[in-house]
Amino acid sequence: MKNVITALLTAALVVAGILSASASEDDVNVVSAKASFSDVKQDLADAIINRGYVIDYTARIGEMLARTGQDVGSGKKIFTGAETVQFCSAVLSRKMLEADPANIAFCPYVIFYYERTDQPGTVHVGYRELDEDGSDASEAAKKAINKLLKDIIKEAANK
């Protein structure tokens, strides 16, 4: 039971982060695609896997919200689909962590994608940018990761 509660709280925090972040915030990059949720999901997976990375985990946030809504006093359906995927690059992460071990806070990389119930047929794909502060080496590594994430979401949204 403790694991279930921990999982629900973790997912709720991720959702809160997604919902509190808007595309206009400097640290969140979002692109939109006129496509089905399943097509964007597959395009995102392909964009990650074709670069040689492995998706370590998929958080099914939309399903969790639908499953737990009544338990928390809300039946409002926010998404028709909402997930995050996490993955890492051994090369880029090693450079980032060798530059500053505290950069572990940025591992793994997370990309979110969702379709809102009030915007059917539009799927939003994005990520929270890594701050590019720190030493020159740290800055360069995080800049490379941000570029990677930006390229992946653009490919997933066919931009």
Image: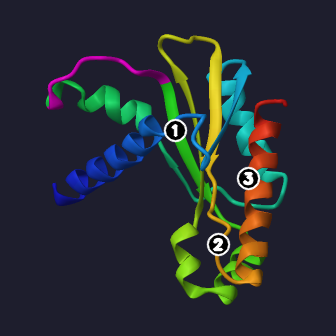
Rendered residue at 84%/52% (across/down): 50
Q: Are marks 1 and 3 in contact (CB under 8 Å)?
A: no
Judged by depth in the image, the label closer to the viewer, 1 or 3, is 3
Q: How many marks?
A: 3
Q: Quadrant of residue 65?
A: top left
Residue under numbered circle 2: 133
Quarter of the image for the C terminus: give it. Answer: top right
- Kind of residue indicated by mark 1: Glu
Judged by depth in the image, the label closer to the viewer, 2 or 3, is 2
Label 1 – label 2 distance at C-alpha: 28 Å
Q: Earlier in the sequence, mark 2 or mark 3?
A: 2
Q: Is residue 5 above or below residue 73?
A: below
Label 1 – label 3 distance at C-alpha: 16 Å
Quarter of the image for the N terminus: give it. Answer: bottom left
- Kind of residue indicated by mark 3: Leu
Front-most of residues 102 and 123? 102
Front-most of residues 1 and 21? 21
From the top left corner, tell me how far across and down residue 59 is, in percent: 47, 46
Q: Is residue 148 above or below residue 32?
A: below
Which label is found at residue 149?
A: 3
Helix, strand or loop under label 3: helix
Rendered residue at 55%/77% (across/down): 104
Rendered residue at 53%/82% (across/down): 102
Which label is found at residue 83?
A: 1
Mark 2 residue crowding within 10 angstroms, few (<14) / some (14–19) / many (20+)? few
